[in-house]
Each structure stands twice: as C-alpha cells, then as structure tokens.
Amino acid sequence: MYRYDEFDAAFVRERTAQFSDQVNRRLTGELNEDQFRPLRLMNGLYLQLHAYMLRVAVPYGTLSGRQMRKLAHIARTYDRGYGHFTTRQNIQFNWPRLKDVPEILAELASVEMHAIQTSGNCIRNVTTDQFAGAAADEIIDPRPVAEIIRQWSSLHPEFSYLPRKFKIAITGAPADRAAIRFHDIGLQAATNAAGDVGWEVWVGGGLGRTPMIGKMINGFVPNEHLLAYLESILRVYNRYGRRDNKYKARIKILVHEEGLETIKAQVEAEFSEVRGGVLTLPQEELDRIGSYFAPPSFEDLPATPIDIARETILDPAYGRWLDNNIFSHYRPGYASVTISLKPIGGAPGDATDAQMEAVADLAERYSFDELRVSHEQNLVLPHVRVADLRAVYDGLVEAGLAEGNAGLITDMIACPGLDFCALANARSIPIAQAISHKFAAPERQAEIGDLKIKISGCINACGHHHVGHIGILGVEKKGTELYQITLGGDGTEHASVGKILGPGFVADAVPDAIERLVDVYLGRRETPDEPFIATVRRLGDAPFKEALYGTT
Amino acid sequence: MEILTGNELLSGAAVYLDADGNWVAEIDRARLFAKDEAEARDAAIAASKATGRIVGVEIETVKMVDGRVVADRIRERIRAEGPTAPAFPRQELGEDGHVSI
C-alpha cells in the first residue's frame, strides 16, 4: 500500500490545523455560517437532517487493518458506534459534533487519511475495481495510477473551483466492476499493437438527473502521458463547462451539447501543448509508486479447487458463502473474499465499530493486511489463501458478517435516503430492508441468481438506480413517498441506463412489485443459467410492464 | 400554521423556536405562527440568525393533529422523529447547546 511521503503528510497536517482554527473561529462567532460553510465542505463536513455528517476519503477504496481500526475508533469515540460505507468507496459518519471534527481529522491524519475533496466542485476520490491487484482477469493493477491521479488532483490549484464536481474511475480489467462508463472520466486498461499497456479514456458519463453513458474520447493514451491527457480534459472542461446552471454544469452536458468530436479536438489541441512537459511521468517515479503496490509475499501454492457441492452438504450457509462471496485470484491457491454488508434486513453499507475491528483482524491475519471497500457497499479481503477460507468465514460468522449473498438480489445498493440526507425526497433504507426480507430465503435467492437492485432516494442517484438491473427511485408526490421502478440498467462494460416502467408505487407495494418482475423472469428465462439482465434484454420491457400494470 | 426550525451549531441537532424564544429539541413545543404573524415570524428569524448559533433557519408549515404538532412535509416529520431505518434516537443538544433569542 502507498505510504505518505513528507509532502502528503505535511499537507494533511496543515489542512487539519487550518480547519481546527476555522472551527474555533466559527465557535467564537468570528466566522458566520455563510463564511464557514464552504470551508467545512472542503473538509467533507456536511450538515444533514439530524446532525453533521463527515465523509472520509478511502483512496481508491484501499485500506489497511490499522486504518480500519482507526475508523472503528472514530465510530466508537466520536459517533454512535457505526459507519456507513458508500458507493464512492468512502465512509461516512452520521453523528459527529462540530467541536470534535478537528480531533477526528487529526486521528485520521495519524493513519494517513483525510476528508479533503470529499465535497465541493473539485476532483473527488478516485474509485476503482475492488479486486484491483488481485483479480484473475486483470491486465494491470490500476492502483499505482489511481495513486498518481490522487497526488496530481489533491489541492490542484487550477481545478479547485471547477464548474461542478468531477469523478474519475479506473479499472485494469476488461470486466468493468468500477462503473467507469458512468463517471466524468473513466479509464480502462488497454494494450496497443506493440503490447504496451495504456489507457482507454471515456468521458462524459454520469448518473444523476441526466444519466449518460460515457463516450470513448481516446482508445489508447500511453501510461506516461496519462496525466497530461487528464489535465487537458480538465482544462477544456474548466474553461467551457457551464457555470450558469448547476444542473447543466457536469462535463457530460458539455460533451452532449458540444459533441464528442468538438470536445476531442479541443482536448487534443491542449494535449499537443502539454504532452511531453512537466506532467510526463518519469519511469523512476512510476517504479517508486508502483513498488508500494508490489504483490505481497504470496506463497507458491498449487491451484486449490473448492468443492462447493460437498461443503454445501456439510454446511449450507458456508456453501452459499463460498458460492457467492469468493472471487478468482490471479495467484493459484488464493481467492478474494467479499464481506457482505447486506445482512437480511440490515442497512446496506453499515458496519459497527466491533465489525470494523473484526474485519481489520481478519485482514491482518489472512489478507496481508489489505482491505477494500467496493462501490457496491461491501468490503473485500483481496488476498486470502483458499486453505484459510473456513477460518475467515468462521471469523465473519462471529462478527455477524457472513451473509453469503454477494451479487444476489439481497445485495442491494441503497443511498442513506430521507432517513439521513438533506437532499433526499424519499427513504431508501426501509425499501431495501423490506425487499431483503421478502427474498430472505437462500433457496429463492439462489434460484434467482445474479440480480442487481439499486435504490436512490432522489434524482441525484447516489444509489445508482439508473444502472440497477432493477432500479428504484424515490420521489415525493403530494406528501407521499412514491417509488418509480426502472428496468434494464447495467453499470458494467455492457453499460445501459434503465427505463422507467410506469407510475410509482407506494412503499408498501414495492416488494410485491419487485417480486412480480422476478416472477416474469423466472417464468420466461430460457435456461436457469440465463441471468435476469439477459432475459430483460431478450424480452424487452413489455412483459415486465404488463406484470406491474396489466395489459394497456 | 408555521413554525421555525434550524440546526443547532455545535451538535447539528434539529431544533425549533418555542414561544419563549428558546430553541428547543421538541417540535411539540414549537411556537405556532398564524398567517397574520408574518412580522413576528420574520423578526424571530432575524434575531435567530443574529445569534450565529442556529444554522439554516427555515419556515415549515404544520398542522395540529390530536394535540400534537405535525409537519406537512415527510422530510420534516422524519427530522422531528429521527431516522426510521435503522431507527436511531435524535441527536441530543449538548449542555452548551441551549440558544435563546
């Protein structure tokens, strides 16, 4: 893992001291709220419905056991004993008090963490594949480049006041687990004819009120010129992105309104100016940063098959967990483990302080002290020996984290919704809980197979509903929460935006509506192996619409 | 009818202006402003802002239901009761969280 150098440590320390002073000035009345608000937001401190909320960055979703322990300590000492992992691979604390926040930031700084650029119109935390550096299908580990982007974008003076926030996602694998086509910039590892690894660059994707799939602006940018290329895009966006209308200020609107070719021409012109300049990545620097992400000292192990059928007979819950929560590792004898933060009836993404500590223990003992946060609001132990899986599972059972439902219908994304969020129009978590209870039976979940439900409590789409195979969007109509259902969204390399099926449902009716959609799928799939999304693509909306609304 | 609400600076807790000019945690204690009390309401907003201790002062419309103050918007009802899922008690005002105008 990357370790802060003296520059990183200094800027985090300085910022913490600065914010501490700003809080003091606010408390003494020297600063009023209008003056203080932008300062607190620059440090990830929001004011929500019931209290402040502190959003802490987890750079590219990577944590050590020590960092996770610190998050547990913060949850216990300054909050209410839990934290909420988000779709941006970050963690949020829902109950901090203003005067404690400088101390929390100092605690975070002691483990090389901070809350800088987790809000505001700047480049936000870079997100990536939760299996980066471990996945069997990976071309290259994207984390060194993610770290370089973090360093370049942190406190970048030219890009501190962009027209709107800016999100970059990167993946080193052909299977896109980071939803890169739904980011302002998406980067996907690519290989050119000479066999060099570089980056396919996608631009102008996004969710929110105007969902758009990113467009490929360049099929191969050499690794050493990536920062120059990113800077060229940001410079064009910073200059021409709309500042007159908040809802049209993201780069997706600029690309949409001006056209990809126009933007590409501008970017290429800028790139020709800056290419080969100060942003060219020197090989020694690439090597230095890359060395932090060198593979851990894996043992040479034989490929170890997992006999799921046998384990299922002996212990069905363990069998389910092996079946769903294990992901192929590139090293024989190793596997990546998804720790589901979606217990039946739980709040998606929430973990208690004790659970965080248990996960830190497991990471230290069994996963070379590495942890990941996934954008699907789960945690990951990336490097576990297959021989240790049972021990890891037993540890997770003890911590209440052993739900074997990764990728299944109860593994939902849900934003905090109107229970916490000042922007929300409707609640999300109780909808997730009700659906989770409805489909709690493991046999039923297994029968349904891979199905991604994603729930947002407002059009800003933090719950990624547009890219749910089934998406649920909460709206408020005449004082009642209603839920629109969309179908056919997909956040992967087969990107698509879900379509609204019809009028919204009241909360109590949502689980039954979802069940009717599932029943259409089960009744109409060609084989038990045809996943939900494939059946939807084959059949179109009509039978699903009919199941919800009858023949029209 | 209308009430005034905001968040107390130190704790961030949701608070309501009562009839004695104190910002309190319970919506049931909120001062109810009738339509013809706009002037008093606006004076209270200005005085509250001047304390620098109440953030985001808003006017909310409410009804009396069985002797209780019930906000018209769902958002405000959840603010008054606390999160429903998972159900948590509301943020408490600290000892230093009492603000009056």
Image (cartoon, helix red, strand yellow):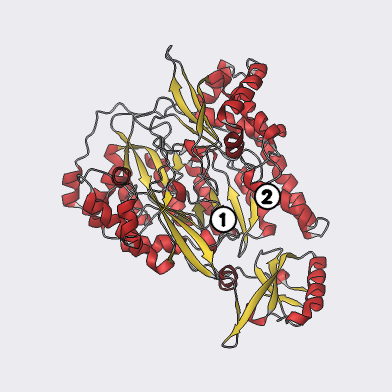
Whether callout 2 and callout 1 share a subunit is answered yes
Q: Secondary structure at mark 1?
A: strand
The amino acid on which the numbered mark 1 sits, given as a three-letter code, is: Phe
| Percent position of residue A243, x then y | 70, 42
Q: Residues within 10 Å of mark 1 (few under 14, many from 20)?
A: many
Asked if the residue at tag 1 contacts the one at tag 2, i.e. Cβ–Cβ closer than 8 Å, the answer is no
Q: Toward the viewer: A331 or A124? A: A124
Residue A144's tag is none
Of residue A541 and residue A82, the one placed in the foreground of this image is A541
Q: Nearer the viewer, residue A234 or A239?
A: A239
Q: Earlier in the sequence, mark 2 or mark 1?
A: 2
Please state, as top left, top right, bottom left or bottom right, where the C terminus of chain A lies in the image: bottom left
Residue A432 sits in quarter: bottom left
Residue at image mark 2: A41
Mark yes or no: residue A1 visible.
no
The residue carrying mark 1 is A93
Q: Please, which chain is the residue tagged with disc 1 on? A: A
Image height check: is A504 above or below A181? below
Task: Name the residue: 20% across, 46% down.
Answer: A528
Q: Look at label 2 and name its amino acid.
A: Leu
Residue drawn where x is 71% and y is 69% of the image: B97
Chain for numbered disc 2: A
